[in-house]
Image: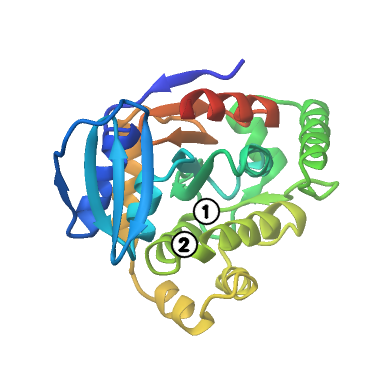
Amino acid sequence: MARIALLRPIQNAGFQGRLNQARTLYPVQATLVMPQQRTGLQMSGQGDRWNVSHEGIAYQLPARADIAYDACMLSPHLTIDFISDISCPWCAVGLSALNLALAQVQPDITASVRFQPFELNPQMGPGGQDIGEHLTQKYGSSPEQQAQIRETIRQRGASVGFTFHADGRGRIYNTFHAHRLLHWAGEEHPAQQAALKLALLQACHTDRQAMDDPEVLVAAVAAAGLDEAQAREILASDAFTQAVREREAMYLNAGVHAVPAVVIDQRHLIAGGQPVEVYVKVIRDLAA
């Protein structure tokens, strides 16, 4: 059973919260009109405005309102923050399962997924460390135990469509620069952030590449359809360093101490890489 926790605040959820988000992005005016029958949310388009009725209160929203429409549409829309580290194999499993779950609940429920940083080994030096040595030092596991866990992860990955290298990662690396690139994508190219995340996970877990190598990171950027030259400029600078550190600290302070962690509407935390059916049930329950 998935553990669902209530995070410290970040914003209110539900219709009013989404409407407030629309107000933040667009000059939205809301007016109280003659009370209507309390039949829930209704929408109609008229001219350059959306007319929205929710529980007897009428709102007028901009017609260009892709954001406003998301805020008030009939199908529940969830904002999902996926907190993870590139070097975490269970994060690859969890993300693949979440994507399958979201496909199952559409079109009844839609969601926007954002990727947030977490470092399992922030002190890892250049060149990384042999994964077997690292796991023994960190968890006290034997080579036999590691092989068994690796096979379990490989099978779980295959069940949700993610391919792990049969021999595992080989080495574990510092992933901070990968998180900087993911933050850049999320800020400036949000539609391609998921593609970059997948390319980085595949480079690490499928292809056993060195995740602190700038060329590996730039190759993932190219695979995601993002600008290689801009990525090189970011890696050669300290761009997004402070933003990533602040985001990592925010989630640690909110109670996220292990990954993967799925945060829905900035309030509900699902810990661990859950099976598809668990994500489906939780998403449906929270959207109800």
Q: Amino acid at mark 1?
A: Asn
In the image: residue 286, left or right of residue 279: left
Element under label 2? Answer: helix
In the foreground, 166 or 71: 71
Residue 214 vertical position relative to residue 79 in the rendered view, above or below: below
Residue lying at the far bottom in this picture: please name it.
Answer: 229
Residue 35 vertical position relative to residue 109 in the rendered view, above or below: above
Residue 92 seen in the current view: no
In the foreground, 153 or 158: 158
In the foreground, 96 or 241: 96
Residue 3 drawn at (x, y percent):
52, 18
Question: Between tags 2 and 1, which lies in front?
Answer: 2
Residue drawn 67% across and 31% down? 136
Neighbor class of circle 1 (other Cα within 10 Å; few <14, some 14-19, many 20+) is many
Residue 65 drawn at (x, y percent):
34, 60
In the image: residue 6, left or right of residue 199: left
Residue drawn 51% across and 61% down? 193
Residue wearing tag 1: 174
Residue drawn 46% across and 62% down? 177
Instruction: Say whether marks 2 and 1 touch (CB < 8 Å).
Output: yes
Residue 258 drawn at (x, y percent):
49, 31
Q: Amino acid at mark 2?
A: His
In the image: residue 97, left or right of residue 26: right
In the image: residue 170, left or right of residue 268: right
Residue 223 drawn at (x, y percent):
65, 72
In the foreground, 63 or 151: 63
Q: What colour-coding does the image apply?
A: rainbow
Residue 87 vertical position relative to residue 2 in the rendered view, above or below: below
Residue wearing tag 2: 177
Residue 258 seen in the current view: yes
Q: CA distance from mark 2 to mark 1?
A: 8 Å
Residue drawn 37% across and 63% down? 187
